[in-house]
Amino acid sequence: MEEKMIDKIRRYFIYFMLYSMIGWIYEVFLEVVIYKWGFSNRGFLFGPYCVVYGFGALAFILSLRKIKESEKFKYIAPVFVAIGIILIATAMELVASYLMEWTIGSWQWDYTSYIYNFEGRVALNPSLRFGLGGMIFMYVLQPLFEKLTKKLGTKKTNVIANVLGIILIIDIICTIISYIH
């Protein structure tokens, strides 16, 4: 039983990293292609990942999966899932802004120009976009990633999770050192 829990944790860590990387790609795409501001690393860490997206994805999976798969609410479940995604993503973005401000003195986005914003930290427009993206994640990407990790098998999944874990730990250490100096 314990081994199965460890395997599950490794799979979830891979999902965390995948969604962190997808979030980074999304952020860079917006910055470079949509807003035409030019490239900057949109993540808090050095690597190509925004960990808030990874944490958000795990929160969606863990808190909304039962609603999504509910037979009782089969036809209305997507509405509940979408509302849940919007609320969770908005709360996580708000908390992330305060954590970043507390640790490094600022946060990496500014929604003051958006209508219906709170202190420039969260706003209706991005929350709705996160809701749409979260629905794509929950109904398209996550089922695909689950199939892929099952096809990989335990051995390959463990190797991938361990390598990603080492990379992330090194990145966290380098980031902390860079903020200290």
Image (cartoon, helix red, strand yellow):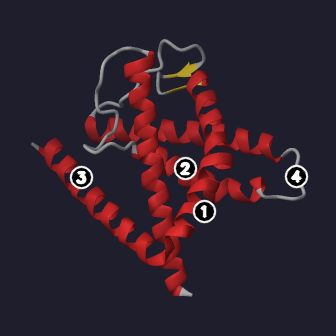
Q: Earlier in the sequence, mark 2 or mark 1?
A: 2
Secondary structure state at the residue bearing disc 4: loop
Question: Residue beneath label 1, please?
Answer: 147
Q: Nearer the viewer, residue 149 or 121?
A: 149
Disc 2 residue type?
Answer: Ala
Q: Is residue 81 left or right of residue 106?
A: right
Question: Residue beneath label 3, please?
Answer: 171
Around disc 3, counting alpha carbons within 10 Å, would you say few (fewer than 14), some (14 to 19), or many (20 or more)?
some
Q: Is residue 47 left or right of residue 12?
A: left
Note whether 109 is above or below 175 in the view shown: above
Q: Earlier in the sequence, mark 3 or mark 4?
A: 4
Secondary structure state at the residue bearing disc 2: helix
Q: Which mark is residue 57?
A: 2
Question: Residue beneath label 4, please?
Answer: 73
Around disc 4, counting alpha carbons within 10 Å, would you say few (fewer than 14), some (14 to 19), or many (20 or more)?
few
Q: Is residue 64 left or right of residue 39?
A: right
Q: CA distance from mark 4 to mark 1?
A: 24 Å
- Asked whether the residues under the numbered discs 2 and 1 touch, taking CB atoms below 8 Å apart as contact, a structural biologist would say no
Residue 165: where, in percent of width, then height?
Answer: 33, 63
Residue 154: where, in percent of width, then height?
Answer: 48, 77
Q: Locate residue 88: give its quadrant.
A: top right
Residue occupying image coordinates x 28% and y 44%: 45
Most extreme residue toward the front, as rendered? 151
Q: Is residue 57 left or right of residue 102?
A: right
Most extreme residue toward the left, as rendered? 181
Residue 5: where, in percent of width, then height?
Answer: 53, 78
Q: CA distance from mark 3 to mark 1?
A: 29 Å
- Asked whether the residues under the numbered discs 2 and 3 touch, taking CB atoms below 8 Å apart as contact, a structural biologist would say no
Most extreme residue toward the bottom, as rendered? 1
Note whether 120 is above or below 66 in the view shown: above
Residue occupying image coordinates x 21% and y 47%: 175
Disc 4 residue type?
Answer: Phe
